[in-house]
Amino acid sequence: MGPTSVGPDRYALPVASDHSRHIGPNLSDEGINVAHVDMDAFFASVEVARDPSLRGKPVIVAGLGPRGVVAAASYEAREYGVHSALPTAIARRRCPHGVFMTPTTSYGEVSRQIMAIFREYTPHVQPISVDEAFLDLAGARRLIGSPVEIARSIRERVRAEHGITCTVGIASTKFMAKLASEASKPDGLGVVAKATELEFLHRLPVRAVWGIGEKTAEKLTRLGLRTVGDLARLDVDSLASSVGTASAEHLYALSRNIDPRPVRPERVEKSISNETTFGHDAPDASVWGPVLLELSRKVASRARAAGWAGRGVTVKIRFGDFRTITRSRMLAAHTDVGREIYEAAREMADAAATAPVRLIGVKLDHLVEAAAVGRQVALGEPEHGWRDIEAVMDKATAKFGKGAVRSAGRLARGDSRVDTRDPGNPAR
């Protein structure tokens, strides 16, 4: 397959030539202090920095098993239609000459060192993923320099100290700063001046708004809404009739760049977990499998309620002899969907559960604000997929109690075999 036009892993913002007066490295940063710093193809870039012979080649960091997915792809690989969350098998067909590499744990250490660079400029740093963070630079203006000067310094240091590039967006809100970085990738600096921010925003396609995926975009297009400006001209009630009240309020606010969320440096790494101890050791997956599914749904429900999405999944297994093991995996993208958590946990449990199981549990970590990452509908996913089903289950549980909704497997067996425990704080 030959090269094709493909943007970054996240939704790519087309920047027309006449956008230069709305976004660019030399525009005024007066009155704007929020920066979004995003590493460019982070995992792949770290591998290239380690091995310079890979420079210029299509590097693809992915799970290499039969069910593996792409975690990151260099920009050379993206030209062949390879992107994060793509099944590895498809990536191999699209780019057979690509350099396929297994993810390593070293990315976390590089991330910590880069975040430490950010904190040398301001204590107000909010990581939202291993490769991106928001910075509030208001307090650094007098001591260090303007946001643009700081951004240039950060980019130079990341390149010099780690051999990788990053893109920085500067704007008045977190939402706008993230749009600015996305529109300036790769290896760019984008400033959206406060005086013209709505002009910049309203010219973008509706898909630019966080949380709008393919299906929602199709609905809005059927209403004749193609740009964010079209969206901004509608009131909440008109939007609600098509996308629901909660989504309508979210879209109404962001289409006007109303995003009061502050940069929250106090956020620490959290996780959400649930585990179950069986009354009698579960002999095989026919017993513990449905329980693992239910636990995954509970974890996802708590994540949605708290506004989190996670990328790390851990399964915990304790055998009859009290030997305890854990297995962990990084997903291709952040999620708050129980079925997606379960599929990863189940694959790890199938390989690890070599004896009767006394306890099984699942944990979601590497949490970020769900609103900051949005969720794109996967190719071929039905309009009302697992997330919609689980949202209905959330409502039923809230209305009728925790026992109102259970998995079919649990209903068939009854609940006498298990004692469900909910350890610790919901976000610990």
Image (cartoon, grey):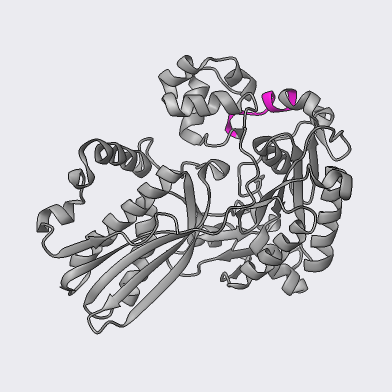
Q: Main secondary structure of the magenta part?
A: helix
Is residue 206 part of the magenta span, yes or no?
A: yes
Q: Quadrant of the N terminus?
A: bottom right
Which is more toward the observer, 237 or 182? 237
Residue 24 vs 115, above or below: the answer is above
- Residue numbers of the magenta segment: 199-207
Residue 266 vs 232, above or below: the answer is below
- Residue 203 percent across, percent down from the top left: 69, 24
- Residue 29 percent across, percent down from the top left: 84, 36
Q: Quadrant of the C terminus?
A: bottom left
Within the image, what quadrant is residue 164 found in? bottom right
Is residue 225 part of the magenta span, yes or no?
A: no
Please tell me which residue is depicted at 63% across the width and 72% down the height of the picture. Answer: 106
Question: On the rendered structure, is 73 left or right of 19?
Answer: left
Which is more toward the observer, 229 or 55? 229
Please tell me which residue is depicted at 77% across the width and 61% down the height of the picture. Answer: 117
Which is more toward the observer, 33 or 213? 33
Please tell me which residue is depicted at 37% across the width and 39% down the height of the picture. Answer: 382
- Does residue 217 appear in this view? yes
Within the image, what quadrant is residue 112 found in? bottom right
Residue 79 vs 169, above or below: the answer is below
Which is more toward the observer, 189 or 272? 272
- Does residue 86 appear in this view? no
Question: On the rendered structure, is 234 left or right of 136?
Answer: left
- Residue 118 percent across, percent down from the top left: 75, 57
Mark count: 0
Question: On the rendered structure, is 125 left or right of 246?
Answer: right
